[in-house]
């Protein structure tokens, strides 16, 4: 797990537990956006996990939550203000856990942030479908969504669907649509010869990824429902 901390913080600050996407053990992919969010005053924890594990990575995801809750104070974070966030498959996992806390140990994060996720199939964190879990009676944390309008991997319509479902049920939700693709939304670009997303300086990625970092920080600092 990588831990990105803000410089010069005095006292506990809000924290973000940020899950990467489908590639196994790719926490490095999220380093650019995690660093950018930390510069805005939050502690960001980025663990590795393996979606190709027999359980789809569920045990590792839960272990990262347990670790964050137990140890975030040692890194200057506030254990009472932990945002659960993720990109791509990690976004589905994060939002899924927030919308179905009973399936994920009963813990409710301070908020959830889904970045370029799809929410109409089972989440690896819960085994249930996030968009179906919207209608649960339990109190749910605010959900913040970010999605690139030029995403060819996960169409922006997937976030729009969840946004509409949450709004219809009176759940606190926001959606930021940014002018970039699936990789640019986390300050990266896909490099075919490396078969990996690497840091990008392209204008669309810098602008969109910076907004994603802002949303992570806003969700962490926000008090009350949106």
Image (spheres, rainbow, N blue to C red):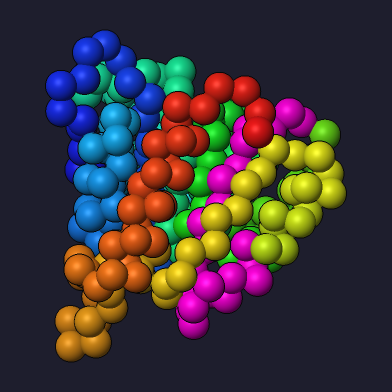
| Residue 172 appears left or right of 176 | right
Percent position of residue 23, x then y: 33, 68
Numbered circles on residues, count:
0
- Viewer-nearest residue: 63 or 5: 5
Q: Residue at x 64, y 68 (%)?
A: 158
Q: Is residue 153 visible?
A: yes
Q: Position of residue 169 (x, y in %)?
A: 83, 44
The image quarter containing residue 90 is: bottom left
Q: Work out whether residue 109 or residue 198 is closer to the camera in this orientation and state it.
A: 198
Image quarter in which the N terminus is found: top left
Viewed as shown, does residue 39 lie left or right of 14?
left
Residue drawn where x is 52% and y is 27% of the image: 222
Question: Which residues are drawn in magenta?
Answer: 138-159
Q: Position of residue 201 (x, y in %)?
A: 20, 68
Q: Up-down: is 73 above or below 218? A: above
Give yes or no for residue 119 being in the magenta stretch.
no
Q: Residue at x 66, y 44 (%)?
A: 173
Residue furthest to the bottom: 193
Residue 141 on the magenta segment: yes
Residue at the image position 32 percent from the left and 67 percent from the top: 205
Asked whether residue 69 is in view, the answer is no
User: Is the C terminus in the top left, top right, bottom left or bottom right quadrant?
Assistant: top right
Q: Position of residue 84 (x, y in %)?
A: 47, 39
The quarter of the displayed image where residue 105 is located: top right
On screen, 64 above or below 82?
Answer: below
């Amino acid at each position: 797990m990588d831990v990105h901390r803000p410089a010069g913080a005095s006292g506990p600050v809000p924290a973000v537990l940020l899950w990467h996407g489908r590639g196994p053990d790719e926490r490095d992919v999220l380093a650019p956006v995690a660093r950018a969010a930390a510069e805005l005053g939050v502690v960001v924890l980025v663990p590795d996990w393996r979606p190709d594990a027999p359980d789809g990575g569920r045990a590792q995801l839960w272990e990262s939550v347990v670790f964050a809750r137990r140890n975030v104070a040692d890194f200057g974070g506030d254990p009472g203000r932990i945002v659960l966030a993720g990109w791509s498959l990690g976004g589905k996992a994060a939002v899924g856990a927030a919308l179905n806390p009973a399936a994920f140990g009963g813990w409710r994060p301070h908020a959830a942030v889904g970045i370029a996720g799809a929410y109409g199939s089972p989440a690896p964190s819960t085994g249930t479908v996030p968009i179906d879990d919207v209608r649960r009676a339990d109190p749910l944390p605010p959900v913040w969504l970010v999605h690139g309008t030029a995403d060819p991997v996960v169409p922006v319509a997937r976030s729009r669907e969840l946004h509409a479902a949450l709004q219809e049920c009176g759940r606190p939700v926001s959606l930021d649509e940014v002018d970039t693709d699936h990789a640019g939304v986390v300050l990266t670009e896909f490099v075919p010869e490396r078969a990996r997303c690497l840091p990008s300086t392209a204008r669309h990625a810098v602008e969109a990824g910076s907004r994603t970092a802002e949303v992570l920080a806003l969700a962490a600092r926000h008090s009350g429902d949106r």
